[in-house]
Image (tube, rainbow, N blue to C red):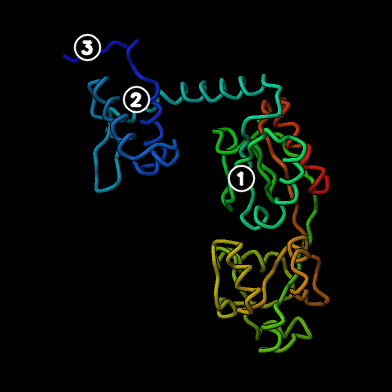
Amino acid sequence: MHEINLNSIDWTQARAFLAAVRCGTLTGAARDLGVTQPTLGRQVAGFEESLGLLLFDRVGRSIVLTEQGRSVATILEPMQSAFDQLALFVDAQRDAIDGSIKLTASDVMSAYILPGILRELQRSAPNLFVDVVASNDVQDLVRREADIAIRHSRPTQPDLIARKVAQTTAGIYAAPRYLSAHGVPKRLEDLTYHRFVGFGDLEITLDFLKAMDLGIDLEARNFSIASDNGVVAWEYARQGFGLAFMADDIGAVFPEMVRLDFELPQIEFPTWLVAHRELHSNAKIRFVFDTLALALGG
């Protein structure tokens, strides 16, 4: 029988196992923890060996939990939660405005709005390192994927602080090149015969436009090109591939882009600044949070 010395269990190995459970692949878990896949694999194998249990079955590139693996994961999850809370507490005790901070925002905002704000942060806190996670996915602040998030929907988690810093408007923009080739639409109905550039999932975009009730009857055929990357999609619009919906603060950065004038219902969406409740009591996080709030309009 395999004897287990619980005092010898390596938390790094246990953490690697939990990451593999969360991600479903060793490659994803390695990326999540910032280590190489072979290193992650060795850590998981070492954890299995230390327990004397088979925790995973390997199926191609994926891994499937065994019954024993599921039981171990259930036991370890509260430990991971306690470790995360400890990390939050320790960070909240630090007062120096230095070190690193992770900020997440959409790719478009990261590329076109944040640079000016980051310059101000560098002037005010030259020893602060800002890691910008340019992503259109919701990042998990509780699990420290980000310290501060800029979002367009209010988070529901009770342990997060959210401040609405702006009510952003949007419009329809076109490149002069597109208008020269396809003409300038004069009425809302004309848009039905024009091409658009899509941002992200086309079905979600169409559902959103229908919910907005803008009086525009657009279908999939209107979208000749699309990209999940907002910066790429906006560049396609700038290159004349089609019309594009865009926030007015982004459109203002590109004076060559023409904002079409219609009796269009006002398109608005909020901008929320979000931080973990404990992190917000940290001087470094509070400083960045307040700087962002002021710059974004709050």
Q: Which residue is denoted by mark 1 in the rendering?
A: 132
Which amino acid does the dot numbered 1 rest on? Val
Which amino acid does the dot numbered 3 rest on? Glu
Q: Nearer the viewer, mark 3 or mark 1?
A: 1
Q: CA distance from mark 2 to mark 1?
A: 35 Å
Check disc 2 and report its element: helix, strand or loop: helix
Indicate the quadrant containing the C terminus: top left, top right, bottom left or bottom right. Answer: top right
Indicate the quadrant containing the N terminus: top left, top right, bottom left or bottom right. Answer: top left
Task: Give the crowd class for mark 2: few <14, some 14-19, many >=20 residues within 10 Å.
Answer: some
Q: Which corner quadrant of the image does residue 253 belong to?
A: bottom right
Q: Which residue is denoted by mark 3 in the rendering?
A: 3
Sequence-first tag of 2 and 1: 2
Which amino acid does the dot numbered 2 rest on? Val
Residue 94, position in %: x, y?
67, 21
Q: What's the residue at 32%, 34% (across, down)?
A: 39
- Viewer-proximal residue, 22 or 197? 197
Q: What's the residue at 36%, 39% (across, down)?
A: 36
Residue 116, position in %: x, y?
75, 51
Task: Give the crowd class for mark 1: few <14, some 14-19, many >=20 residues within 10 Å.
Answer: many
Q: What's the residue at 37%, 36% (across, down)?
A: 20
Check disc 3 and report its element: helix, strand or loop: loop
Q: CA distance from mark 3 to mark 1?
A: 46 Å
Q: Which residue is denoted by mark 2 in the rendering?
A: 72
Residue 200, position in %: x, y?
56, 63
Q: Is residue 151 above or below residue 192?
A: above
Q: Is residue 10 above or below residue 176?
A: above
Q: Nearer the viewer, mark 3 or mark 2?
A: 3
Residue 192, position in %: x, y?
67, 83
Q: Nearer the viewer, mark 2 or mark 1?
A: 1
